[in-house]
Amino acid sequence: MAIIDNGRTLAVSPSIDERAIDHHAEKQVGNVTPAPDLEHLALSAALKLAREEAQVLVNLHNAVLADASQPRAAAVIQVAAAAQKTAERVAAKLLAANQKADMTISGIEKATFAPEGGSPLDLEIRAALKAMTPADRTKALGEAFEANDLSIIGSVLRAPGLLTGMPAAELEALRHRFREQHFPTEMKRLERLKKMRAASDVAGGAFVRLVQQAADTTYANGAIAARSKRESALAAHQQGA
């Protein structure tokens, strides 16, 4: 059974840091302080906890394994147990923060997906656009944007892509333009939240790897199994005494 070198030390990844989240927060403009973003605050707090717990775990790991006064197996079991508890504390908070942000992202995307409502002319408008050449359709949709004619834009964005006759990339470009024109504030927040979630995923992955290293799973499982076998044998002996 492989035993990790006693001299090995661990370190907290720079990505496990709330500043990776805070970096993408809305910035103050002039004397106007942005309203608190609950999703940002939740993600930042979760990463702060992850950073603090990771550092405590690293300190414990390095101190325990450097202590020659106890057997190697006992030290590994002690650190593995601490790693498991650390993982549970951080995972619960990080998962809740991620889910909160994901729900908000999904809500913004849904609310800005297309103009509300609908018209009996939607089918005819889509048919007319579908019959145009790509160049003519681009021109017609551009004019609709300039005139803020949501009846034309909405007839396309509300329909399944298959019914528009438009390539997926063209349809998404149209939706992006609609969102930027009518929901600029929401789009900026959506971009910030997506960047925060990406940073949270990177930090979460780094945290999991750190816990796995600290737990020294292969050796710890063997040590725990050996301890359990010894305790069972001792218990059986005491019962037979």
Image (cartoon, rainbow, N blue to C red):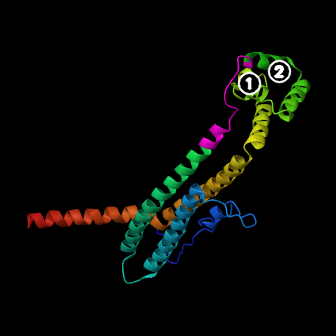
Residue 219 among those drawn in magenta: no
Q: Main secondary structure of the magenta part?
A: loop
Three-letter code for the amino acid on which mark 1 is drawn: Ser
Instruction: Determine the residue positioned at 63% across, 68% down.
Output: 14
Q: Quadrant of the N terminus?
A: bottom left
Residue 168 relative to residue 4: left or right: right
Given residues 28 and 94, the one toward you in this image is: 28
* Vertical order, 120 against 174 (above or below): above
Residue 142 relative to residue 204: left or right: right
Q: Which residue is mark 1?
A: 155
Q: Which residues are magenta?
A: 107-122
Instruction: Determine the residue positioned at 57% across, 72% down.
Output: 11
Where, by quadrant of the figure, is residue 165 drawn? top right
Q: Which residue is mark 2?
A: 129
Q: Position of residue 153 (x, y in %)?
A: 77, 29
Please state which of the two labelled residues, at mark 2 or mark 1, is closer to the viewer. Answer: 1
